[in-house]
Amino acid sequence: MNAEQQQSPLNILLTDDDADDRSFFEKALGKIPIATHLVTLNDGEQLMDYLSLNSEQLPDVLFLDLSMPRKSGFECLTEIKDNIKLKELPVVMFSTSYTQDFNYELSMIDVLYKLGAQDYIRKPGDMAELKKLIFHSLCKVIKVSRLNLQEIEL
């Protein structure tokens, strides 16, 4: 992606209840070759309040932790995709793996995509892998948004 294609930073919203995971994400995001602006929130209730207050100025993408207290990522994703003002917001689900039951994880991922998630990232333990996964997800979001803009221009 060159400078002409990426004129302004991507506005990214991360909602994760784990402060270490938020910090790790922020560090990885700072090392990828896409200009970004990051806002972080601590839980699903804060997220839904934030989106309600900012529904006219949504982020370019939301990275949403699946397992959070107060309101889970599943609940937030469902509310977002059921809301006319929010449903076009690209959501990347972000979670630790369920290694104890691989089939459960696959069925959960399938449900997330059916609910409207754009992507799913299993939280890795190392920085290089996290950078790669975030970069890949952001490239998908950029590609889809460009396709949508091209459709509008036609």
Image (cartoon, grey):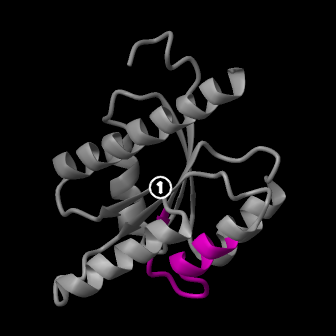
Q: Residue furthest front?
A: 154
**Image quarter for residue 120?**
bottom left
Residue at 36%, 65% in the rendered image: 21
* Picture layout, residue 30 above or below residue 153: below
Residue at 80%, 63% in the rendered image: 52
- The three-letter code of the residue at mark 1 reads Gln
State the quadrant of the C terminus: top right
Residue 27 at x, y = what percent?
A: 34, 46
Residue at 17%, 46% in the rendered image: 128
SS category of the residue bearing label 1 = loop
State the quadrant of the N terminus: top left
Residue 148 at x, y = what percent?
A: 61, 34
Front one among 1 and 49? 1
Q: Is residue 146 left or right of residue 86?
A: left
Residue that numbered label 1 is attached to: 118
Q: What stretch of residues is rendered in magenta?
A: 64-79
